[in-house]
Amino acid sequence: MAEQIKAVRGMRDILPEEVKIWQTVESIAFQTLEAFGFEEIRVPVVEELKLFQRSVGSFTDIVQKEMYVFKDKGNRILALRPEATASVVRAYLEHQLYTKRKITRLYYAGPMFRYDRPQKGRYRQFFQIGAEIFGGKSPYFDAELIVILAKIIEKLNVSNYVFETNSVGCDACKISYGIKLKQFLEPAKDRLCQDCQTRLQGNVLRVLDCKVISCREIIKEAPVIQDVLCDDCRKHQENFYTTLDDNKIHYKKNPYLVRGLDYYTKTVFELKIGEEENAVAGGGRYDNLVSELGGPETPAAGFAIGMDRLCALINLEVKRKKEICVIFLGQHALQKGTAILNSSRVDGIKIVADYEQRPLKNHLKIADREGVKHILILGDNELQKQIFLYKNMSNGSQKEIKFSELSKFFKEIDNA
Ligand code: AMP
């Protein structure tokens, strides 16, 4: 036998049963976003590497360790996107979307790629639904993003969720906090992991994001950014929390939350379900990213939902669509019957034809095994009488359906 090729490590197939859950989640998420005025944008999966270096940050794990980078035939250095905010900002600038509306609300959905260590809830290709708001600096925008996430998650019947929130401050706050944090970490330097020892020099805030247990122990005692926030950042945060309270959002302040991407300023948040340590969504404000990528000063905020994690955690009962199976007995019935069937099909109703010739009892056995309850049979007798014979596999009842009434019959079955 020929060698069987398997999916690449860290990449996986989403099979039809799971896709039904994904489609339900997607349609709830898209409808909710559209109701808040968001419009869909589709951006490429491949971008220039420097887009991510300049946005996500050269000192992040994502850029340093997890990027799929390659040269194309024209010697361009490209990357598979590890996230989509950078691409959406690039598109926002490239198409000058800021000239069209004062506030631009965009959403996207698609696969992201990170060469991470595959484990439960962590893949190398994973799927995100994300939202971005450009042009608004009020904390009400930050709160709107959280309200949207809460609405989506509640429509999915999830109640045991919490938002973890923090502020990482503006650039000035980050600098003063960085100095304080470095002073605190310096004496414990030897107990930090190798990566964190480098982070200490390059981008000390990243130490807060380290997953190594010995580093986490040290971080527990670290000073908090709260203590150095400037007036503007403090006010922003207070108003954000008041708005969350007014909207009855369930949140928990986590003074060490920094997220894995460098572009965040002020508000950051993560959505967690139950006891799961991994967040299912994350986001925050990024007031400098648009200008850092060459655009006008534009405050912005956004979030990304991890579909793989979310869909694994929810308990969605997706109703199975009724299926009607059509069987043709004999070549003559097959030849005449398929056109009659195809002209009677009704959109949205699942009608599956089996063109293979086999004895009726074998057809029925297959239908039974596959759980199909509604069968239409066309043999020479039926063809002559211009009817299909309907067999209800649940109760064994039978009846004749006229060719002319086939569509009506399909609708009746679907509505029953
Ligand atoms: P981030 O883009 O890092 O802000 O992550 C946003 C969300 O994407 C996370 O909360 C996860 O749900 C999801 N996510 C990030 N990385 C992965 C991964 N390697 N595998 C699966 N989901 C991921």
Image (tube, helix red, strand yellow):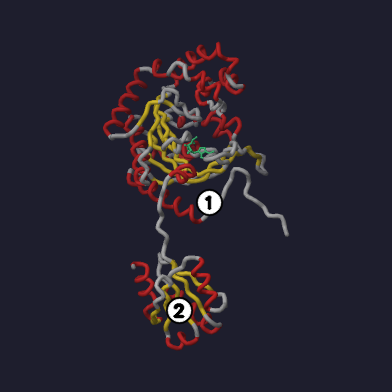
Task: Specify few, some or many for label 1: CA neighbours under 10 Å numbering under 14, 14-19, or 20 or more.
Answer: few
Q: Is residue 102 left or right of residue 130?
A: left
Which quarter of the figure has residue 47? top right
Q: Disc number at residue 340? A: 2
Q: Is mark 1 within 8 Å of ligand 1?
A: no
Q: Residue at x 42, y 77 (%)?
A: 390
Crowd rating for badge 2 (residues with CA inside 10 Å; few <14, some 14–19, many 20+): few
| Contact check, label 2 and label 1, Cβ < 8 Å | no
| Local SS, label 2 | helix
Q: Position of residue 29 (x, y in %)?
A: 39, 46
Q: Position of residue 272 (x, y in %)?
A: 42, 35
Give the amino acid type for the residue marked by disc 1 in the picture. Ile
Judge from the rendering whether residue 281 lies leftward or rightward of residue 73; answer left or right.
Answer: left
From the viewer's side, name the closer residue of 266 and 165: 165
Closer to the chain start, of discs 2 and 1, is: 1
**As shown in the figure, which amino acid type bears the numbered disc 2?**
Ile
Q: Which residue extends farthest front?
A: 395
- The image shows residue 297, relative to residue 415, as above or below, that is above
- Judge: label 2 CB < 8 Å from ligand 1: no
Q: Residue furthest right?
A: 1
Q: The N terminus appears in which quarter of the rendering?
A: bottom right
The quadrant the C terminus occupies is: bottom left
Residue 14, given in percent of the width and then of the height, sits at 53, 51
> At 39% across and 28% down in the image, what residue appears?
165
CA distance for labels 2 and 1: 35 Å
Q: Residue 14, which numbered label?
A: 1
Residue 56 or residue 356, whichever sits in front: 356
Q: Residue 271: percent from the left, percent from the top?
A: 41, 35
Which residue is drawn at the image coordinates 38% and 34% (left, top)?
Answer: 162
